[in-house]
Image (spheres, grey):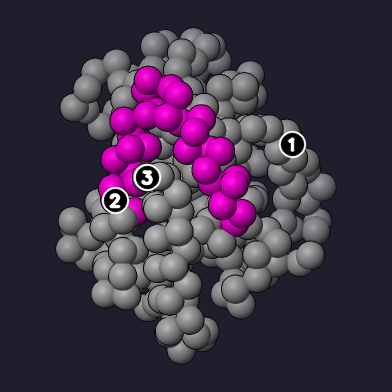
Amino acid sequence: MPGDVADPTAVAARRALLDGLDALGPHAPFVVLVGAQAVYVHTEAVVTGIALFTRDADMMLVPPVATAPDIERAMHDAGFTSGAQPGIWISGDGERQVDLLVPDAMARRPGRRAAYLAGHGRRAARLVPGIEGAVVDSAPRAISALDPRDVRRVHLRVAGPAALLVAKAYKLTDRLAEGRPGRLGTKDAFDAYRLLRLPSQDLLAGFARMASDPVAAPVAAQGIVKLSELFLDAHAPGTLLARQHVEGIGEPEIVALSVVALARELIDALRA
């Protein structure tokens, strides 16, 4: 069953993902796809009428990462330049971005932005909270280019829907705390809505996997709290952002009602 079409930026982002994997080479076994591209892998059959949109490729590195080849040198050799923050890599044409991320709970030096992977430069990757669940809630998937002229196809670990939902809850909460969620905030809320439309048994299984892991469990538990705060009712901040994302191009009222009902159903099942 076909899903929503990909925006041209999403096509470029998929190219960035494949370019980044080519650059990392032997480090690929340590990579888990997270972020919007992982959401779209799971929701490729979900039809919302809203185009898939993302500007970057979020790739989580799971420590301990091999010390060779040097990640910074490999990314530079592949034509990427370091961005404003550690872990941000921009293509030479400026049109594609790869974010190399490490779960915050696995930090060698807590409280710092740079991930400090042994054997690699301090700008190779950055720490991000909320993605810890993807270490245990993930599985290999076949990933292909979205550009029909690009024939590349790889097998890559992809974060599961539950881990992605927790990560989106963390990201949305942070954006709201900053006071200016903007268009990216509405997209993140709508991505959460896409995930909530998946079969509940798939989400519950993912939360069970996270609950059994000592590192992921507290992050997942806090993610459930954040989801409740974001989508508790029609006036909750996440609900309003999801509704705002489709104003003028979709059906905001239906989206708002649906995301609240789906979030309540999941949270009630998890608390039960």
Tell me where residue 60 appears, x and y as whole percent.
Answer: 48, 33
Q: Residues within 10 Å of mark 2 (few under 14, many from 20)?
A: many
In this view, 266 is above or below 79 = below
User: Which dot marks residue 271?
Assistant: 3
Q: Residue furthest front?
A: 272
Which of these two is toward me, 228 or 182? Answer: 228
**Span of residues in magenta:** 198-227
- The residue under the point 74% across, 58% down is 147
Element type at marker 1? strand
> Left or right: where does residue 95 sit relative to residue 25?
left
The earlier-in-sequence mark between 3 and 2 is: 2
- The residue under the point 59% across, 56% down is 198
Q: Which residue is mark 1?
A: 154
Asked if labels 1 and 2 touch by Cβ distance under 8 angstroms, the answer is no
Q: Which residue is mark 2?
A: 226
The earlier-in-sequence mark between 2 and 1 is: 1
Task: Decide whether residue 106 is among the magenta residues.
Answer: no
For marks 3 and 2, give the CA distance: 14 Å
Tell me where residue 53 appears, x and y as whole percent.
Answer: 54, 64
